[in-house]
Image (tube, rainbow, N blue to C red):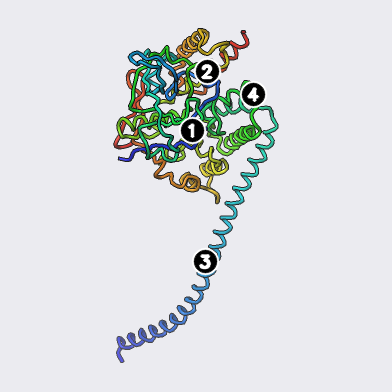
Amino acid sequence: MTVGRLIAPESDDEILDLEPEALAFKPVMTGDAFVGLRVPGEPDPMDVMVAGHPCTIRRGATLVERVPCVRLVEHQWVPYERWPDYDQNHFPIPAVADIGQGRCAALWEWTAVPRDELLRGRRRVTLQDQGIYIFLQRLIHSLSRFAPPVTALKEASAHVLAEAELEYSWVMELLDGDPDSTHLTQLVSEFDAFMTAENRRNTLRTDRKRVAAEVDAEIRRRREAT
Amino acid sequence: MTTVDQSIDLFEQQGTASEQINTTTYAELAVRTGKVAQQAALLSDQVDQTSGEVHQLHAEALAQALGASALDLESEPLAPLLTELTEDFAFSWATLARCIRVTPTAVRKWRRGDEPAREKKQRIARLVAFSRFLKEIDPRVQDVGDWLEGLMTPAATLTRGDVYRIGADVDLLRIARSVVRVGPDNIRPEDLLDHYVRDWRTKYANDERFAVEWDADGMPSIVYDEDGE
C-alpha cells in the first residue's frame, strides 16, 4: 500500500500566520499555540498547541467544552528539510513565533484544556491551512505510524476551514474592542446564527463562492448600518 | 522441343531477364533510398528544431503578454483588483494568499486599506492578469480560484496553486491551452512537474484510494477503497 510521506514545509511563510490581527481575531483552530493556561490537575500554568481535528473541536462556531491539546516543551529545532524523516514525534515551532527558542509541540503529551482558557490574548501562534494539514499529518503519524495523504486531510477539513475563514473576516471587520471581550462572543454567536440560517453551513460544502458572497454582503450591510 | 520445354525455357529466360533488371533497379533504389532517408532525417531534425523554436516562441510570447498585462494592472487601485480575484474569479483568501506567498491576514489588511509593498502589489497584478488569460484560453474554467485548488495530476498531492506559487504561471497557461487545442507547445502536467519539482514522484506521491465520505452524523471520514473508486 502506498501512503503519503510526511511533508516538509517550504518556509515559515508557508505555514505560520503570526500577524497581530490573526492572533487576535482568527477563530481558535488546530495548531494554535497558547501560553500560560490553567489546566485542572496541572500544578503550573501550561503552554499548549490545539491538536483536535478542525471538525472535532468546533460545533458550528462554538468550541467544544474541553479541547484536545498537546503540551509545548523545550526541544531542538529541526530544519524543514529534515521534517519528513527526523524527530517525527514533535512539531517544531520556528523561533519567529513569540514563545522562545527551541519550542516544540510534543505530539504524545496530550491534555484536555477548558475552552475558556483558550483566550486570544494568550495565543502566540496560528497556522495557515497548509500548516494545519502538515500538523495533522505529523500528529496522526506520531500516533499510528501512518502518514495520510495531505489531499485527504485537506478534503476532510475544507468545509470547517472555509467557515473559519469567513468567521475571521466577520470578526475582523465588525469587532470594536478587545478580542476577548463579550462583543466578540456576541459577534461569533451572530455569525453562527447567520451560517445556520438558510442552510448556509451545509451549502458551504458545495458552493463556497455563494456563501462567501453572502457573508461579505452581510458584513457590508452591518458596517453601513453602524 | 516440346511445348512444355519451350515454356520452361521461356520462363527461365524471362526469369533471368527479370533478375537482371531487378538487380540494377535495387542497386539504384538502394542508393536513392539512402539519399531519401538521409534527407528525411535532416528534415525531421529541422522539424524538431523548428517545433522546439515554435514551442519556445509560444512560451515567450505568452510570458511577454502576461507580463505586459500585469504591468498595466499594477498601476490600478488595489481594492478592485482584490475584488476581481475574490468575487469574479472566486479565490478564497487562503488560496489567494498562498498563490502570492503572503499570509491570509496580510490580504485582509490590504482589503481594509493597508498598502502592500510594491513587490506584493506586482504579484497581485500578475495573478489578476493570469486569471484573465486563463478564462480567455479556456472559457470552461468557471472559477480560477477553484481551478488552482485542483490537483496537477491524480498521481501527485501538488495543486496547480502550489505550482503557481513556485513561479510556473506561464507553463500553467500552456497546460490550460493544451487542454483546449493541440499545438506544438502542448505540455503535460507531469512534464511540468518534472521540470519544477524533480522528486515529486516520491515526495508528493498521491494515493487515490484514500477518499472522504460523509457519515450519517454529518462529519467526514477518510476511508480506504482498494479499488480506488
> Looking at the picture, how far across and down is residue B51, in whole percent?
56, 55
Cα distance in 3D space between marks 3 and 2? 69 Å
Query: Same chain for the residues at labels 3 and 1, yes or no?
Result: yes
Query: Same chain for the residues at labels 3 and 2, yes or no?
Result: no
Q: Where, by quadrant of the figure, is residue A160 drawn? A: top left
Query: Same chain for the residues at labels 2 and 1, yes or no?
Result: no
Q: Which residue is mark 1?
A: B149
Dots 3, 1 in contact, CB < 8 A: no
Q: Is residue A174 left or right of residue A37?
A: right
Q: Residues within 10 Å of mark 3 (few under 14, many from 20)?
A: few
Secondary structure under the numbered disc 1 in the rendered image: helix
- Which residue ends up furthest to the front in the rendered image? A43
Q: Nearer the viewer, mark 3 or mark 4?
A: 4
Which label number is shown at residue A24? 2
Query: Same chain for the residues at labels 4 and 1, yes or no?
Result: yes
> Looking at the picture, how far across and down is residue B184, in whole percent?
55, 51
Q: Nearer the viewer, mark 3 or mark 2?
A: 2
- Residue type at the position of mark 1: Glu
Q: Which residue is mark 3?
A: B41
Which label number is shown at residue B114? 4
Secondary structure under the numbered disc 3 in the rendered image: helix
> Looking at the picture, how far across and down is residue A68, in whole percent?
36, 20
Cα distance in 3D space between marks 2 and 1? 28 Å
Q: Is residue A18 left or right of residue A8?
A: right
Cα distance in 3D space between marks 4 and 1? 27 Å
Q: Nearer the viewer, mark 2 or mark 1?
A: 2
Query: Same chain for the residues at labels 2 and 4, yes or no?
Result: no
- Residue type at the position of mark 4: Asp
Q: Residues within 10 Å of mark 2 (few under 14, many from 20)?
A: many
> Looking at the picture, how far across and down is residue A141, in whole percent?
34, 33
